[in-house]
Image (cartoon, rainbow, N blue to C red):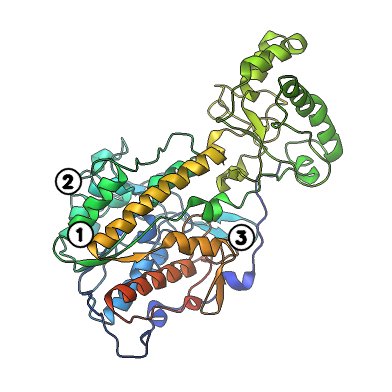
């Protein structure tokens, strides 16, 4: 089984010349009149948020990505109308990854680049140490974006405490620049007495659940509850505090996860004769015939005997065949299948088949296969990820083909619907807070929906959601590309102009790369 899907790339788009920050700044206004801040005061701008705010891209945080963050692009424009310096807790290199006491942590690896076939890690070792007193001493930093942060994390006084890294109550990206282990991100931002702020938070409150396939290991933040518990209480506490001294600001809502390529790139039906006939499987027609005779046929017949006809169909020699998945929303027919298979397979084997296929079905277009699932298709299940506590024997040892992909690999319709309901609730809270506090508002959900459904044109360039070639997203399928961040910055600036009467123009997105090359100076 092929472990990597093949990605197409327009090489001319990949390695566009990268202009310096100074070259990217546009000094003329949006209306041709002299530049003005309107009623906003940009002299002390602080940015709060998560990985998007920090400039995370290609699966890592690295210096060039931080330079190209939408917040840094905005700050460059603010400088033209009286904005002050915008300090960023820069990483040490363009490799990405983190060191913990000089040791590499595999959970924080290097950034990705496109090698012409697939996204792969860049070479080189990270030099960015989490425990670095010099970084703390060089603060405070205007960009307080913390990759991985959920809304309630910004209120936690121990989110920057090194002692909390072991139990997950702290975040190494914040530990690296936090002034101490008792200051929340919000308190850190407020200590700088901001005159203007940006807040884009809440994405991870739903995204974590989605990127874990809705398996429950990364639950969605409740939509309602007290500050630090429910999203509404938390978000309103954030905005109330940020505006308490008269600061103005801009906030953005949360896009549906279904608009990003992480969930829309791997097809639900990638199993073809050529795929089944390579790697871990035997050859072509013989393989499909054998699978139909030994697995799909008996399963289909057993389910039909039980009155269920829509879960399993025979594989076809033409076109794509759907992945075999587990759907926990289905009625569990383990006991019934065990009873049907016992006469022919014996009690022990029949019980195993019942346990494995009791909630199995073939995927449909309504399912979303995670980008990271591509490496699991055709791989052998292990005791840790099989769902039955042990590695299944051949021939039931090929994920998605002879063994159902488990919950964490696929978003099923019930999970997708749950995500939409919660995102809508979060977005209603954000919109209401923006209205109540008189803040500029960016409808990121609508913007990403446009990008996903046909793309948008900016500076004569089309931005779409297609993985690798679309121009909007980086190689992790979640975070923006350099051009995507520039486009987002412009949308924030448009909202600021509309709300506060400023006339900042923004930047030309054509001056920003689509993808970073393997080597960055």
Question: In the image, what residue occupies the spot 86% across and 35% down?
Answer: 286
Q: Which residue is mark 1?
A: 242
Q: Of the numbered discs in the image, which one, if any, rests on residue 100?
A: none
Q: Of the numbered discs in the image, which one, if any, rests on residue 182?
A: 2
Quarter of the picture holding the N terminus: top right
Label 2: how many residues lie within 10 Å, few (<14), some (14-19) or many (20+)?
some
- Judging depth in this view, the residue of 271 and 366 nearest the camera is 366
Residue 520 image position (x, y, % from top left):
47, 67
Q: Would residue 267 be found to the left or right of residue 216 on screen? A: right
Give the distance between the C-alpha atoms of the residues marked 3 and 1, in whole angstroms: 44 Å
Q: Is residue 232 visible?
A: yes
Q: Would residue 126 be found to the left or right of residue 290 on screen? A: left
> Which one is closest to the eye, mark 3 or mark 2?
2
Q: Earlier in the sequence, mark 1 or mark 2?
A: 2
Helix, strand or loop at mark 3:
loop
Give the distance between the C-alpha atoms of the residues marked 3 and 2, in whole angstroms: 43 Å
Q: Which residue is mark 3?
A: 115
């Amino acid at each position: 089984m092929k472990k990597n899907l093949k990605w197409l790339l327009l090489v001319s788009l990949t390695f566009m010349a990268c202009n310096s920050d100074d070259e990217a700044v546009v000094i003329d206004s949006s209306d041709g009149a002299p530049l003005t801040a309107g009623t906003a005061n940009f002299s002390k701008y602080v940015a709060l948020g998560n990985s998007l705010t920090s400039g995370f891209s290609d699966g890592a945080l690295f210096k060039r990505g931080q330079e190209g963050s939408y917040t840094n692009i905005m700050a460059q424009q603010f400088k033209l109308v009286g904005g002050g310096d915008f300090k960023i807790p820069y990483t040490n290199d363009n490799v990405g990854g983190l060191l913990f006491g000089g040791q590499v942590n595999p959970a924080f690896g290097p950034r990705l680049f496109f090698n012409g076939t697939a996204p792969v890690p860049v070479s080189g070792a990270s030099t960015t140490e989490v425990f670095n007193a010099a970084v703390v001493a060089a603060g405070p930093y205007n960009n307080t974006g913390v990759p991985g942060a959920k809304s309630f994390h910004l209120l936690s006084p121990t989110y920057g405490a090194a002692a909390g890294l072991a139990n997950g109550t702290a975040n190494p990206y914040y530990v690296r620049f936090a002034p101490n282990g008792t200051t929340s991100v919000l308190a850190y931002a407020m200590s700088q007495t901001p005159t203007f702020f940006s807040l884009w938070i809440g994405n991870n409150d739903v995204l974590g659940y989605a990127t874990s396939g809705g398996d429950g290991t990364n639950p969605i933040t409740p939509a309602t509850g007290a500050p630090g518990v429910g999203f509404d209480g938390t978000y309103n506490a954030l905005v109330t505090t940020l505006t308490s001294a008269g600061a103005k600001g801009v906030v953005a809502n949360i896009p549906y996860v279904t608009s990003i390529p992480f969930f829309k790139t791997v097809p639900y039906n990638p199993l073809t004769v050529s795929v089944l006939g390579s790697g871990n499987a035997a050859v072509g027609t013989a393989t499909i015939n054998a699978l139909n005779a030994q697995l799909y046929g008996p399963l289909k017949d057993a389910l039909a005997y039980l009155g269920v006809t829509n879960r399993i169909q025979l594989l076809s020699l033409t076109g794509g065949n759907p992945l075999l998945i587990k759907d926990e929303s289905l009625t569990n027919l383990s006991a019934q299948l065990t009873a049907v298979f016992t006469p022919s397979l014996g009690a022990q084997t029949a019980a195993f088949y019942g346990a494995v296929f009791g909630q199995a079905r073939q995927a449909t277009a309504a399912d979303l296969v995670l980008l990271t699932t591509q490496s699991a298709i055709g791989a052998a299940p292990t005791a840790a990820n099989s769902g039955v506590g042990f590695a299944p024997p051949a021939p039931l040892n090929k994920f998605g083909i002879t063994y159902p992909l488990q919950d964490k690999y696929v978003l099923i319709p019930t999970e997708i619907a749950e995500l939409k309901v919660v995102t809508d609730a979060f977005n209603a809270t954000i919109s209401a807070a923006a209205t109540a506090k008189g803040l500029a508002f960016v409808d990121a959900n609508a913007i990403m929906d446009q990008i996903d459904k046909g793309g948008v044109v900016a500076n004569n360039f089309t931005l779409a959601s297609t993985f690798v070639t679309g121009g909007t997203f980086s190689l992790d399928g979640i975070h923006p590309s350099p051009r995507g961040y520039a486009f987002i910055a412009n949308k924030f600036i448009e909202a600021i102009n509309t709300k506060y009467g400023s006339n900042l123009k923004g930047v030309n997105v054509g001056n920003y790369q689509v993808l970073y090359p393997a080597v960055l100076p």
